[in-house]
Image (tube, rainbow, N blue to C red):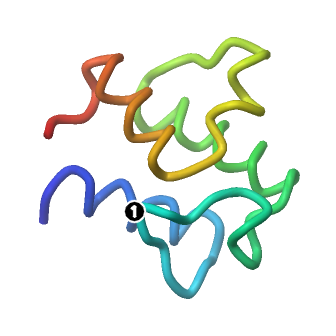
């Protein structure tokens, strides 16, 4: 399992979603709403030992953007 597969699995479990793809995003994925976003951000901060700035919480709202953020933070490999 790649680190990106592990991230998708983490998001799926955290939000209790049936399926998560690279295109999954808040508001476009059934079950990923604003409350789920806050839950997910908190879980990511704890699990990956990162911190989000307040303005990033709304911007990092898709698997693709979360992946990019974690790669830039050095917490996820290619």
Q: Is residue 8 above or below residue 35?
A: below
Decide which of 2, 24 is in the foreground and name it: 24
Q: Is residue 66 above or below residue 5?
A: above
**Alpha-carbon neighbours of circle 1 within 10 Å: few (<14), some, or many (≥20)?**
many
Is residue 77 left or right of 17 when viewed as pictured?
left
Image coordinates for residue 71, horizontal then vertical, percent: 29, 28
Is residue 11 left or right of 15 when viewed as pictured?
left
Decide which of 74, 29 is in the foreground and name it: 29
Residue appearing at x 49%, y 52% in the figure: 63
In the picture, residue 67 is in which quadrant? top left
Residue appearing at x 39%, y 32% in the figure: 68
Residue appearing at x 77%, y 33% in the figure: 58
- Residue extending farthest to the top is 53
Image quarter of the C terminus: top left
Image coordinates for residue 54, horizontal then vertical, percent: 78, 16
Image quarter of the N terminus: bottom left
Q: Is residue 15 above or below residue 78?
A: below
Q: Which residue is labeled 1 in the image?
A: 8
């Amino acid at each position: 399992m790649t680190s990106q597969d592990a991230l998708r699995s983490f998001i799926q479990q955290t939000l209790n979603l049936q399926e998560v793809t690279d295109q999954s995003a808040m508001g476009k994925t059934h079950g990923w709403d604003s409350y789920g976003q806050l839950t997910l951000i908190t879980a990511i901060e704890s699990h990956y030992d990162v911190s989000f700035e307040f303005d990033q919480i709304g911007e990092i709202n898709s698997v693709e953007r979360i992946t990019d953020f974690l790669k830039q933070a050095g917490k996820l490999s290619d």
